[in-house]
Image: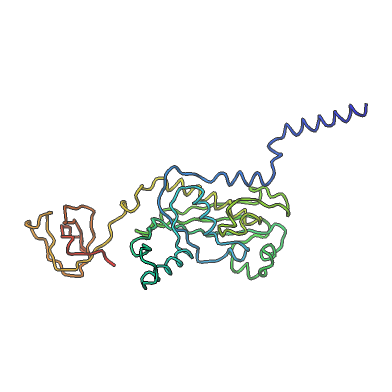
Amino acid sequence: MKGMKFLSVVALLAAVAASMPLFAKSAQDRRDEKMGEIPVCSKKIGTVAVVEPDTNWWQQAGLGSPEALIKVFVRKSNCFTLVDRGKGMQAIQGERALAAGGDLRGGSNVGQGQIKAADYVIVPDLISSNNNAGGHHFGALAGGLMGHHAVGAAVAGINTKKKTADVVLTVTDVRSSEEVATVEGHAKKTDIGWGGRGSRATWSGFGSAGASGYSDTEIGQVITLAYLQAYTDLVTQLGGLPDDASAASAQQAVTMTKPGRMYATPDTNGQVIKALEPGTMLYPTGEKRDVLWEVTDELGTKGWVSSLLFQLAR
């Protein structure tokens, strides 16, 4: 009888477990599922550079720069071509300085005109971060980096009763300086299902990419999910941008290097609209006929000018 009762209890527990598969998922499983939601694109939207915001709030939380975090999203999503405008660029400039000084070997093929231009710049920032559910100050959770008053002065909007993060991603067109998107993201502790002080996520690639603290701290994971939400919405918004951002933007201004004339038609034997002096700034419309370009001057006068007489404005 005892054996039968034992088997009945085991069967009952097994039935309960089978009826609750969704609730049996670990906190780590839930976090990994969230990271699996990074959008993947079939084609590139454009070329981006990710740069740090002016305020270094992440240091107070014991985290790495959010620049590194967004770069992880960009690489995993395949939605953009990523160019480095941080420490990697500094090293590149050093190599180019060596090349300019004649110190590199012959055939190194390092010089001007090789760096890929960014179409857009992404700036990740923090609207507010509420870091402490137990009433302790921000610095204590971040490893005792600093006291409550210092953190409160540096990071506005901290609520010590919740762990939530509100972030923003701003995208700027490098040619026009237009802000083409500003997307906010929000996340809270319950979104990650943190299972206790000993829990740790295993989001691969974060630490090695310089995004330290975002996978193994509560507030780091909350901020990560907030940025993930913002990045997902950002990709959706930018999906309507032109395939070739360079071609779609206004032409770069040019400056007359020699005296010349502006013609009414793409014909140097036609009507002359006005004479042009060296140094005159002109704005190409994109229309071309052989060496003649259609331009407008700073007064709005439109006509045709020989491209042999001007150069790109510096």
- Image quarter of the C terminus: bottom left
Q: Quadrant of residue 84?
A: bottom left
- Asked if residue 77 lies left or right of residue 156, the reply is left
Return the x and y of residue 66 as percentages of the image width and height: 54, 59
Q: Residue at x 46, y 45 (%)?
A: 236
How is this picture coloured? rainbow
- Asked if residue 142 lies left or right of residue 271, the reply is right
Residue most extreme to the front:
106
In-front residue for pair 28/262? 28
Residue most extreme to the bottom:
101
Return the x and y of residue 308 as percentages of the image width and height: 17, 62
Q: Residue at x 66, y 44 (%)?
A: 29
In-front residue for pair 192/14? 14
Total numbered labels: 0
Return the x and y of residue 86 as percentages of the image width and height: 47, 64
- Asked if residue 101 lies left or right of residue 225, the reply is left
- Image quarter of the N terminus: top right
Q: Residue at x 34, y 64 (%)?
A: 112
Return the x and y of residue 121 as percentages of the image width and height: 43, 58
Q: Quadrant of residue 272?
A: bottom left
Q: Residue at x 61, y 66 (%)?
A: 60
Residue most extreme to the left:
269
